Amino acid sequence: MLTVVAASSAGTAFEWYDFFVFGTLTPTIAKNFFTALDPTAGLMSALALFGAGFFFRPIGALIFGRIGDRVGRKGAFLITVSMMGAATFAIGLLPTYSQIGPLAPALLILMRIVQGTALGGEYGGAAIYVAEHAPPHRRGFMTGWVQAAASFGLIGALGVILLTRTVMGDVRFADAGWTGGWRLPFLVSAGLLAISVWMRLKLSESPAFKALAAAGEQSKAPYAEAFGQWKNLKLVLIALVTIMSAQGAAWYTLFFYGEQVFLERFLKIAPLTGTELLIALTIASAPLYVAFAALSDKVGRKWVIWGGMTLALVSFFPVFHAMTHLANPALEAAQAKTPVVVVADPAFCSLQFDVIGKAHFTTSCDLAKNALSNAGISYANEMAPAGATASVRIGAQVIVSREAGGLTAPGQKAAAEDVKSRLTAGLAAAGYPAAADPARVNFWGLFGVLMILVVACTALFGPIAVTLVELFPTRIRYTAMSLPYHIGAGWIGGFMPVSAFAIVTATGNIYSGLWYPVIFGAVSVFTLPFLLKETRGRVIEV
């Protein structure tokens, strides 16, 4: 049993490492592969590309779920780990935008599709394989190690990135050429791939599937059986609504949006500090997944999960407000003393969300909001007379923006730079800091408040694997459980950072993006008690 857990969890950790390297390096990816876009559009495109990998996870779940239910669990996740490792290694060899132009992001998108498809088949296979080997009274504890594998993968990704960045320095690390240090974490995946394949080749098929195959009872049509029969489709929908809606939104809010976007971009802490904080939180989270999963063996799965999602729901806004106070008190003071207001005709204000980089934001409102968003500044919106040129009010200062619609491309760029420079000077005069003062960043205070969300997310996520395994019959387990998991984690969770960032740029409030996890979390909190039945103690060999 130890070999089963070790091989399954290690392989999953290696796959998560591959996926998290990309997520952690999103700002660097934006600079090197979306050079043609301004910083805001570039970051949003990179965040959307991070989400694009998640978009293909349900597709991977369907592809490999069918293989796992018809051919076997082992073969399915041998293929997935090979695909993931190869795609990640290839990203480390890709030329950047400065080297081959628009072909660079196109190749990057292709690799992300392969990664997302592979990860869609990985999780279900590992969770099922462990659960079908585990004794019933320890099923939660054993599958808890599969949940913790996400942390091990993230720790590995962050550790390699931190080491490389420290040794090479920020400039060499971010370099767009062939010697850029950002490539090394991707290339390391070749070694991890070899270890993963070797470990998984040593495994045999799960007992439940072998018994099913020996009796000739494998599903001949997993899709039709899982999604075409109401008794099974109902379970898929219950899993998605009561569990995965909250899990996807909460987990990615904490481990991706909170650090990469909120702390680094909005609160302007040093990237190295943010990475160190994320490493500390991830290390602290690893044993908690196992602990809460083991707790579910004793008290049941349902209420452990519900307690975690409820704690997350009520904590998002208080925790993120506390983060501002602890990370950048000067920014908090400036926002309270001298609020920023954009005065503009709403008809000329765009939703600045442009994944493919074809839109042109050239109105006076767009230039003003773009500059403020790039600076991570919260602002209120005030309606101006129809057709009026937008302006930004910073206390007593009024800075008039510019219209750039009729200008050439160089003229538009110059106009945007002019608006940006005048706003930067105005913000500095009003006491807005250009960056968080390292001496005033309360690292352990941030760690403490974020641990509230760590406890919430680990209680929510820890027992999920065993719950999903126990929810579905053996014949269609791989297909049926993988789809709702990857819709929740892939679509709801994967698109959380880019969606929340778009909400912030539209409203001007750096906290408004939190409505994304709050809404999805509330769906699960209010439906789980009524729709999800307790699964602990169920026989899963049928």
Image (cartoon, grey):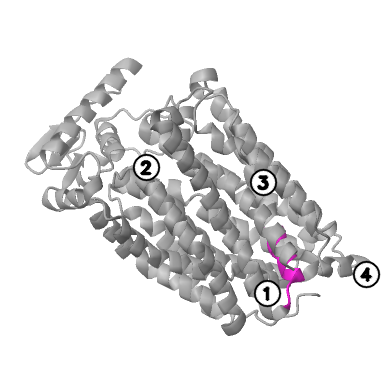
Q: Which residue is mark 1?
A: 139
Is label 1 in a helix, a strand or a loop?
helix
Q: Earlier in the sequence, mark 2 or mark 1?
A: 1
Is label 4 in a helix, a strand or a loop?
loop
The disc labelled 2 sits on which kind of residue? Answer: Pro
Q: Which residue is mark 2?
A: 271
The relative height of residue 503 versus residue 362 in the rendered view (above or below) is: below
Q: Earlier in the sequence, mark 3 or mark 1?
A: 3
- Where residue 215 is drawn, which disc sits there? 4
The relative height of residue 180 versus residue 294 in the rendered view (above or below) is: above
Which residue appears farthest toward the right when viewing the image? 215
The relative height of residue 57 versus residue 49 in the rendered view (above or below) is: below
Disc 2 versus disc 4: distance between alpha carbons?
56 Å
Instruction: Locate residue 384, reporting x and y percent.
Output: 17, 40
Q: Which is in the foreground here, disc 3 or disc 1?
A: 1
Q: Earlier in the sequence, mark 2 or mark 4?
A: 4
Which residue appears farthest toward the left when viewing the image? 396
Identify the image quadrant of the N terminus: bottom right
Would residue 505 be visible to someone looking at this image?
no
**Looking at the image, which residue is at 30% across and 21% down?**
412
Is label 3 in a helix, a strand or a loop?
helix
Q: Which residue is mark 3?
A: 117
